[in-house]
């Protein structure tokens, strides 16, 4: 088959690779219904994180099971499934504690920007539906796999509560999903930091009540002003840079909580500041598996439309253009159509 391979920074190719096959009895092979490009794929694309040799890209996926290994019992060929970017057994002590993204058997999904993909630990990783969802549900189901699951975790980790005040730092796809999550959790006020009109509009659609365009000290001052000098109960840090973490810590009230899901690049902490600020922090790779059944139900009930975050749709053959558009911020998030 043809699939997406990154050969180095800025060099994404759709080229011939070996067909995925069952390698372990716990594997499943799925035929992708659609796939997409993640903001985190841009780190190696921009050369900010390095990788050794060509890499099979893609970790967000939903599709139809075509084959299962002999030890797979929870999903069957012909079934529609969604999985997380973290492969997990869903049974070990960390999984049982709700942190499937730190599973003792954790692997990270790769190779999903392709017509077919191998999913290890299929029983623990995949969640199936009873019926095949309609075609218009596919983008929403795909969003659950990572971008919504991660935004949801940011809100959950930040302890968003009914009536609470929430600040979302970052207007990328994950930040926008964080707005949607906070809204679903009943936040009273959701302040989004964004200076891009299309993203502001989408944030409002997902439930943002206030938009702050200022950044740095000015941004912090603006939010403190909006919250009468108190700060936010919950802050979702969805970028992963030193500046965005400072922003998050600058607007979180004492006793408030920061959920951070941006992969840190150049973030460091001052011990004295941490001590006197009295802020809770929880973050890391999202245990999307914990949220999958609930989020899939919400999509199927048409309670949420997270797929609106895809503002560019391309056939998978044009995956290189999809990366370019996101790199140049012409697109928030690219969905890749798989028609093969
Ligand atoms: Zn586990």
Image (cartoon, rainbow, N blue to C red):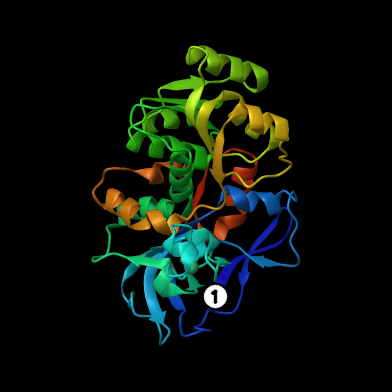
Question: Where is residue 270 drawn, in percent x and y?
Answer: 73, 34
Residue 191 vs residue 17, the one in the foreground: 191
Residue 201 at least partly seen: yes
Q: Is residue 66 above or below residue 147?
A: below
- Could you tell me which quadrant the C terminus lies in? bottom left
Q: Is residue 106 above or below residue 198?
A: below
Residue 12 vs residue 264, the one in the foreground: 264
Question: Where is residue 286 drawn, in percent x and y?
Answer: 50, 52
Give the structural element (helix, strand or loop) at label 1.
loop
Q: Quadrant of residue 204?
A: top left
Residue pictured at 24% horizontal, 65% vertical: 131
Q: Is residue 308 above or below residue 24?
A: above
- Could you tell me which quadrant the N terminus lies in? bottom right
Residue 200 vs residue 331, the one in the foreground: 200
Residue pictured at 45% horizontal, 38% vertical: 178
Question: Where is residue 297 drawn, in percent x and y?
Answer: 28, 53
Relative side of 37 to 63, left or right? right
Disc 1: CA contacts within 10 A as few (<14), some (14-19) or many (>=20): few
Residue bearing mark 1: 1
């Amino acid at each position: 088959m043809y699939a997406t391979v990154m050969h180095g920074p800025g060099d994404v190719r759709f080229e011939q690779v070996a067909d995925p096959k069952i390698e372990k009895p716990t594997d499943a092979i799925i035929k992708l219904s659609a796939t997409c490009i993640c903001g985190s794929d841009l780190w190696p694309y921009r050369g900010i994180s390095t990788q050794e040799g060509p890499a099979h890209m893609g970790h967000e996926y939903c599709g139809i099971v075509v084959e299962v290994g002999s030890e797979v019992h929870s999903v069957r060929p012909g079934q529609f499934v969604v999985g997380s970017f973290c492969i997990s057994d869903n049974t070990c002590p960390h999984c049982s504690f709700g942190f499937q993204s730190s599973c003792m058997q954790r692997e990270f999904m790769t190779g999903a920007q392709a017509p077919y993909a191998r999913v290890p630990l299929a029983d623990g990783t995949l969640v199936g539906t009873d019926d095949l969802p309609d075609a218009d549900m596919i983008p929403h189901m795909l969003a659950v796999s990572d971008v919504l699951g991660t935004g949801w975790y940011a809100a959950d980790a930040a302890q968003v509560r009914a009536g609470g005040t929430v600040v979302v730092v970052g207007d990328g796809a994950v930040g926008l999903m964080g707005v949607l999550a906070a809204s679903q959790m009943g936040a009273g006020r959701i302040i989004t930091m964004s200076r891009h009109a299309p993203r502001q509009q989408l944030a409002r659609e997902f439930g943002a009540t206030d938009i702050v365009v200022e950044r740095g000290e000015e941004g912090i001052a603006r939010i403190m002003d909006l919250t009468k000098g108190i700060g936010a109960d919950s802050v979702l840090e969805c970028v992963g840079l030193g500046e965005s973490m400072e922003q998050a810590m600058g607007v979180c009230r004492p006793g408030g909580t920061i959920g951070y899901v941006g992969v840190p690049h150049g973030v460091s902490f001052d011990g004295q500041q941490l001590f006197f600020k009295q802020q809770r922090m929880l973050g890391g790779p999202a245990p999307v598996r914990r949220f999958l059944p609930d989020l899939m139900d919400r999509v199927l009930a048409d309670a949420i439309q997270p797929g609106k975050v895809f503002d560019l749709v391309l056939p998978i053959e044009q995956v290189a253009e999809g990366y370019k558009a996101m790199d140049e911020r012409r697109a928030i998030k690219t969905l890749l159509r798989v028609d093969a």
